[in-house]
Image: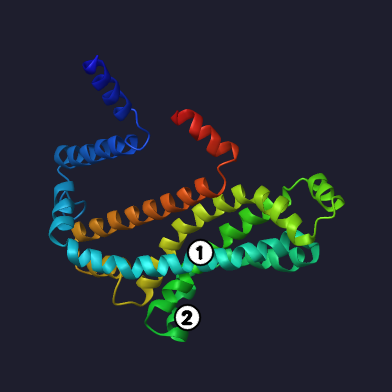
Amino acid sequence: MSETKRQGAAARLLNAPWLRPFFLLIMIIVAWDLAIRLFHIPAYQIPAPGDVVKVLWTDWPELLSQTWPTTQATIVGFLLSALFGIPVAMLIAGSKTVESYVYPLLVFSQSIPKVAIAPLFVVWFGFGIVPKIIAAFLLGFFPVVVSAVQGFKSVDPDMVDLARAMKGSRISVFCAVNLPHALPAIFSGLKVSVTLAVVGAVVGEFVGSNSGIGYVLQRSIGTFDLPTMFAALVILALLGVVLFWLVDRIERFAIPWHVSQRADFVLAA
């Protein structure tokens, strides 16, 4: 009986959803190493996985210290995008006049490459964390607005009319009907925003910075230190995954009643 239980526990562990990405990652690393060996790809074009792991192991203290400025700029820029994006979405969804004025300008602003205007932030705000925060904010702002607008516009008008007929105030109706109905769409935008905020922070570091993972990438590209560059890319990918996971955890806590969360619960059970 105990042997059967152990086999069942091992089977559940192997089928765990969180373990499957690691299996895929191992397969990618093995294929990467085999491709280098079979096709004799030189190290100055693509480094071997072992060289990247060696850099991560030996230079971990420096890489960790350089990760903090990027993480700080990413989190602050993401929080600002949520803080300003959701109210702007409320105004756009609640007023046709505001939508006609603001929404086209938001779409127009997204056609401007952020890497092209990032040098202006350095000129205006100097070499520091502020340009990185602004770049992260600009990249994360638009997904929050678009998703939140879609969420607020998808609220059933009959539910709003019913709540108002029950003599609910504007604020109570918003908190009881509009906001809960829009939260799934808002969190979808936040999960996209937090990954784009990482990109924005790195863009700011590329333009003008002496710290951060973007600075490490720029320095390693200048010296053709490909193992360090790939190690920095791995750290950026891990940073994006961790921040995405945190937003996903908050979503599960905030809207456990939504069908997507209940479906995950049923599948997990």
The numbered disc on residue 120 is 2
Identified by mark 2, the residue type is Leu
Residue 227 visible in the shown view = yes
Q: Distance between the residues labelled 1 and 2?
A: 16 Å
Residue mark closest to the camera, 1 vs 2: 1
Q: Which of 166 and 269 is in front in this view?
A: 166
Query: Is 234 positioned to the left or the right of 197 in the image?
Result: left
Query: Is 224 positioned to the left or the right of 86 in the image?
Result: left
Quadrant including the C terminus: top left
Query: Is 64 positioned to the left or the right of 239 in the image?
Result: left
Name the residue: 50% across, 52% down.
Answer: 191
The numbered disc on residue 97 is none
Image position, residue 86 (x, y; %): 62, 62
Name the residue: 18% across, 61% down.
Answer: 60
Quadrant including the N terminus: top left
Image position, residue 107 (x, y; %): 63, 62
- Determine the image quadrant of residue 68: bottom left
Q: How crowded is mark 2: few (under 14 residues within 10 Å), some or many (20 or more)?
A: few
Identified by mark 1, the residue type is Leu
Image position, residue 177 (x, y; %): 72, 50
Disc 1 marks which residue? 139
Query: Is 121 positioned to the left or the right of 49 in the image?
Result: right
Q: Nearer the viewer, residue 119 or 66?
A: 66
- Circle 1 sits in a helix, a strand or a loop, which is it? helix
Q: Do the residues labelled 1 and 2 touch (CB within 8 Å)?
A: no
Name the residue: 25% across, 16% down.
Answer: 4
- Determine the image quadrant of residue 206: bottom left
Earlier residue among tags 1 and 2: 2
Q: Nearer the viewer, residue 249 or 47?
A: 249
Residue 111 visible in the shown view = no
Q: How crowded is mark 1: few (under 14 residues within 10 Å), some or many (20 or more)?
A: many
